[in-house]
Image (cartoon, rainbow, N blue to C red):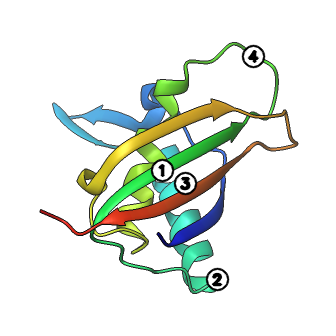
Amino acid sequence: MNEYYLKLPWPPTNNTLFSVVNGRKIKSKKGRIFTEAVINQITKENQQFNLSGKLKIKIVANPPDLRKRDLDNLLKAPLDALTQSGVIADDSMFRSMCIDFGEKVKGGSLDITIWEIGDAD
């Protein structure tokens, strides 16, 4: 079982990831900035693994402060960014997900571990 480790910046929440403009839902400025930062980082670190089999992911969310947060609101932006940056072929490949809060760190970060657990169906 291959294991891949990535450290990503703190993402925008689901609540701020999209905006509605002229009745259309589009990615917000915060969402675009986050995705671009992830793509630049992944490209710079040559981590475009393009994983396409069954995957398992663990995310440790290290918040920038101690405000109350919903963990589930943190998933959409990083999973989409992993797809758009070429780390994974599609976020539908995840068969198991675990997300935990870690320690408060300046600026916040996500520690992500991905395991290949088998071939795609």
Q: Rounded to the nearest whole Å, what is the CA distance between mark 2 and mark 1?
A: 19 Å
The label nearer to you, 4 versus 1, is 1
Assess whether mark 3 and mark 2 are in contact (beta carbons under 8 angstroms).
no
Of the 4 image quadrants, the one containing the C terminus is: bottom left
Earlier along the polypeptide chain: callout 2 or callout 1?
Answer: 2
Q: Which residue has dot 1 on it? A: 57
The front one of 71 and 10 is 71
Point 56% across, 75% down: residue: 42
Q: Residue furthest top?
A: 68
* Total tally of numbered discs in the picture: 4
User: Residue type at mark 3?
Assistant: Phe
Q: Which residue has dot 4 on it? A: 67
User: Residue type at mark 4?
Assistant: Arg
Relative vertical location of residue 48 with respect to residue 102 in this rendering, above or below: below
Q: Rounded to the nearest whole Å, what is the CA distance between mark 4 and mark 1?
A: 25 Å
Assess whether mark 1 and mark 2 are in contact (beta carbons under 8 angstroms).
no
In which image quadrant can residue 106 be found?
Answer: top right
Earlier along the polypeptide chain: callout 3 or callout 4?
Answer: 3
Assess whether mark 1 and mark 3 are in contact (beta carbons under 8 angstroms).
no
Q: Which residue has dot 3 on it? A: 34
